[in-house]
Image (tube, grey):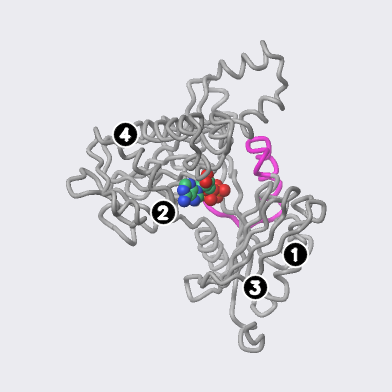
């Protein structure tokens, strides 16, 4: 461990990304106006196969420990375990604040915000907009406020980056009153898109100024149209259920199916919700797995169908977003599948060959940053996302603005 006397004056901040079955965290040292990773970890499998894994900035394992399901049955128990592990490590630093990923900022927040009682009450009001995620996101904020009321906390929203959407992209073809009440297409994965847009601006400034579609393909999946680094439209809508099929979420669906499930099959709202959020997507299509790696490796025809369905819908969405942009200057892949699956990237690009997209098979297989072939009408890129770093940067900026 670093000598406490040497580092106790070094400012640092913590980033927490809390979901319902996992909590990710990263500790960053503050270096002027930027941040440098100290360690990052996750406690996942809460209530099933809890496992705490933490690595240092160089990727060296600091801890890899499994727990019994009843030892860490709830997110609150997970927070205690993480807190106990972190405490002696953060004691070496001067903690200046904590940044949190919060899925929903509603129609109100178009940027990160310092949490106080009023903000927390407003964010609680958005729980019905994202029941699965918002509660899990707010829980560690509440716990930390009780334990360390002196520590500033900043909420960073998945919706904020999309808040400048034109009304055309925000409306459903529903009566206006619903839009006024907040039933709109918010869009999610905003922290990921914001990070990718900033990376693109740094790596390829010319491309970053153009019309770009970013495909965030993880266990949650969406695509976003960017013009000059700004979000114009997203495939995700009122909830994180819309748009592309995902690991276990259905993606876009004829709303008549929901009526059918309720009226004809007698399912309750909760049962429909469980089906659409937890039993659909790649898992529902294949009946085998929600994990793209397993599906690609599987010889079963149902697995092949699920992979092909996913790739078709992603390609269709990219084409639709290109229409919104009035053309496409570049396509970027990111998140678990987008960063690591040459197979999926090749199939999506193959379906966009009519637009002139051409992959270089060797660069694609090698996971290079630029994977287009000579003669492709557009650059094809792979940019690893880093939502936690985006949250860390936002947090630093909000805290700096407090000091004037
Ligand atoms: P989360 O939304 O949980 O952060 P990730 O961005 O980590 O999700 O993406 C998880 C998905 O990425 C899983 O479906 C997983 O199978 C997929 N994935 C990760 N590595 C590969 C790979 N090498 N090939 C195909 N899919 C992969």
Check the image and report above or below for 155 versus 241: below
Split into 4 quadrants, where in the image is the C terminus? bottom right
| Circle 4: element type | helix
Residues in magenta, as a range: 111-134
Q: Closer to the camera: disc 4 or disc 3?
A: 4
Question: In this view of the protein, which residue sits in the foreground, 16 or 266?
Answer: 266
Is residue 164 visible to us here? yes
**99 inside magenta stretch:** no
The quarter of the displayed image where residue 257 is located: top right
Whether residue 245 sits left or right of residue 101 in the image: it is left
Q: Closer to the camera: disc 2 or disc 4?
A: 4
Residue at the image point whose x is 48% and y is 36% from the top: 299
Q: Closer to the camera: disc 3 or disc 2?
A: 2
Mark pair 3, 1: CA separation:
13 Å
| Dominant SS type (magenta) | helix
Residue that badge 2 annotates: 196
| Circle 1: element type | loop
Looking at the rendered structure, which numbered label has been put on residue 149? 1
Q: Closer to the camera: disc 3 or disc 1?
A: 3
Question: In this view of the protein, which residue sits in the foreground, 126 or 122?
Answer: 126
Mark pair 2, 4: CA separation:
23 Å
Q: Position of residue 102 (x, y in %)?
A: 61, 49
Mark pair 2, 1: CA separation:
33 Å
Mark pair 3, 2: CA separation:
27 Å
Mark 3: few/some/many CA within 10 Å (<14, 14-19, 20+)? many
User: Please, which residue is most extreme toward the left here?
Assistant: 375
Residue that badge 3 annotates: 95
Marks 2 and 4: CB-CB under 8 Å?
no
Which sits earlier in the primary sequence, circle 2 or circle 1? 1
């Amino acid at each position: 461990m670093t000598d406490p006397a040497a580092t106790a004056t070094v400012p640092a901040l913590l980033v927490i990304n809390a979901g319902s079955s996992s909590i990710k965290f990263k500790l960053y040292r503050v270096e002027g106006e930027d941040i440098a990773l100290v360690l990052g970890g996750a406690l996942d499998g809460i209530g099933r196969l809890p496992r705490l894994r933490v690595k240092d900035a160089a990727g060296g394992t600091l801890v890899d420990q499994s727990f019994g399901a009843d030892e860490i049955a709830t997110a609150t128990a997970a927070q205690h375990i993480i807190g106990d592990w972190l405490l002696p490590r953060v004691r070496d630093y001067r903690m200046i604040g904590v940044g949190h990923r919060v899925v929903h900022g509603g129609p109100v927040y178009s940027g990160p915000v310092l949490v106080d009682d009023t903000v927390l009450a407003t964010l609680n009001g958005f729980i019905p907009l994202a029941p699965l995620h918002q509660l899990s996101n707010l829980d560690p904020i509440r716990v930390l406020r009780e334990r360390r009321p002196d520590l500033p906390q900043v909420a960073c929203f998945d919706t904020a980056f999309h808040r400048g959407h034109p009304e055309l992209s925000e409306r459903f073809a529903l009566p206006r009153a619903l839009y006024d009440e907040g039933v709109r297409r918010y869009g999610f994965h905003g922290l990921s898109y914001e990070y990718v847009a900033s990376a693109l601006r740094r790596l390829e400034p010319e491309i970053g100024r153009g019309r770009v579609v970013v495909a965030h393909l993880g266990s949650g999946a969406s695509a976003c149209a960017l013009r000059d680094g700004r979000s114009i439209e997203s495939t995700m809508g009122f909830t994180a259920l819309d748009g592309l099929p995902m690991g276990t979420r259905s993606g876009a669906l004829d709303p008549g199916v929901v009526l059918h499930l309720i009226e004809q099959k007698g399912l309750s709202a909760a049962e429909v919700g469980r089906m659409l959020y937890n039993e659909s997507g790649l898992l529902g299509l294949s009946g085998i797995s929600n994990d793209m790696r397993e599906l690609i490796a599987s010889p079963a025809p149902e697995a092949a169908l699920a992979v092909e369905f996913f790739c078709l819908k992603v390609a269709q969405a990219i084409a639709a977003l290109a229409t919104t942009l009035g053309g496409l200057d570049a396509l970027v892949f990111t998140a678990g599948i987008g960063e690591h699956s040459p197979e999926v990237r090749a199939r999506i690009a193959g379906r966009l060959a009519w637009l002139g997209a051409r992959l270089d098979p060797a660069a694609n297989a090698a996971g290079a940053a630029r994977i287009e072939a000579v003669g492709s009408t557009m650059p094809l890129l792979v940019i690893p996302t880093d939502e936690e770093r985006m949250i860390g940067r936002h947090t630093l900026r909000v805290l700096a603005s407090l000091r004037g």
